[in-house]
Structure formats: structure tokens, C-alpha cells
Amino acid sequence: MTVPVVHSLREQIREHIVEGIVSGRWKPGERIVERRIATELEVSQTPVREALRELESLRLIESAPNKGVRVRNLTAADLEESYPVRAGLEQIAAELAAGRLASDCSTLEPHVAALYEADAASDGTAQVRHTVAFHRELVKAAGNAVLLHTWETLGIEVFTALSIRWLGTVQKSYAEEHQELVEAFRRGDPNIGALVKAHVLGCAPRA
């Protein structure tokens, strides 16, 4: 398999490893062999090492002398830790984006529509993808690059997917609660920041 040149090589390799973890190819506690990935993707070991280092900073993997790199045995408590941080960031984003989204929610609406379809089909993969995309657009609407970068470094898509796959934190309807947020933005709800914060915290896995 050859990595397509779309983003940087490191990013492509990172996504390949993340997909392997989320899909269950590499299970908690299982070793990830750097040389094997390099051979499989037909790349040198250097960008693989860089990608693994980045995933270690996200706490998805861990390394130890003479033991190599392994997928972390993440618990509900581990996954839960990022949610208060994420909730605070999204509260700020919602407050900054309130004026813009009150007049135009077109960046959020397609993901709500896709979530209705995903809910009807019980498509967990699509639920994760469009839930995260909705929140990314919300944060982007704040127009603050530092805020967006900080939000993205939390690895939200990965942790959302892992929460569902490993802990079974499946909701019956993702669409309706996101539709409620869109409507709150449209009516200029003065409590929009608190509503978004409560929404995010409500999605957190429970230890």
C-alpha cells in the first residue's frame, strides 16, 4: 500500500494508525511495530516514528524501553478527561460565533441532515464523523485560529469513536440534539455558551 500524497506523509501515516486503532486492528495493549508499518506503507521509518510520537502525545499509545510501542489500555476515566476541556473550549467558541451563526447556520445544517440519516440507519461511523464535523464547524465559526488549533489537538474524533466502540456510549439520536443547538443559534439564545457546554459534557463517557 502506498500512502497518497494529499496531506503530509506524517499526517497520512497518523491517520492510517488511528484508523487501525479505532477499527480494532490494533487492540488495547497490542504492540504497534514501526518497521512493519513502514514496510506496509512503503515509507521510511522516520515519518512513522514522527506519527507515533504525535499519537503518544494524544495518549493513544505508550512506549517503554525494550517493550516498544503499544496501544494504551484506555479506560472510561481516561476518555472522560478531555471532555471538560473540550466543553470549555466549545463554550468560548459558541459565544464568539453566536452573532455569525445567528444569521447563517449553513455550515452546520448539512451535518445535522446527515445525522438524521445516520441515526435512521444506526450507522455509528457516520454518527461519529458528522458529530465531530458539526462541532469543528462550530469552533471554526468563532474565527479564532488558536482556539481551533487547541480544540483539534484534543483528538476529538478519535476519542469520540473510541468511546462508542470500546465503551458502548451510543446515543439513540445524535441529530435531534444538534438540531436543538442550531435552533438556539438561530434565535440568538443568550445562554448558547452554557447550552453547548452542557451538550458536550452530556456526551462524556462515565467511569
Image (cartoon, rainbow, N blue to C red):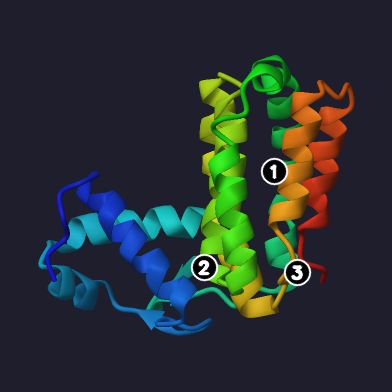
| Residue that mark 3 sits on | 172
- Distance, label 1 to label 3, CA atoms, is 22 Å
| Residue that mark 1 sits on | 86
Q: Is residue 26 above or below residue 57?
A: below
Q: Is there any visible trace of residue 59 in the rendered image?
A: no
| Residue that mark 2 sits on | 125
Q: Earlier in the sequence, mark 2 or mark 3?
A: 2
Q: Residue at x 77, y 50 (%)?
A: 177
- Distance, label 2 to label 1, CA atoms, is 21 Å
Q: Residue 157 occupies which quadrant of the picture?
A: bottom right
- Distance, label 2 to label 3, CA atoms, is 14 Å
How far from the left and from the top, in percent, is residue 175? 69, 54
**Kind of residue indicated by mark 2:** Thr
| Relative horizontal placement of residue 30, taking residue 176 as reference (left or right) | left
Q: Are marks 2 and 3 in contact (CB under 8 Å)?
A: no
Q: Residues within 10 Å of mark 1 (few under 14, many from 20)?
A: some
| Numbered circle sitting on residue 48 | none
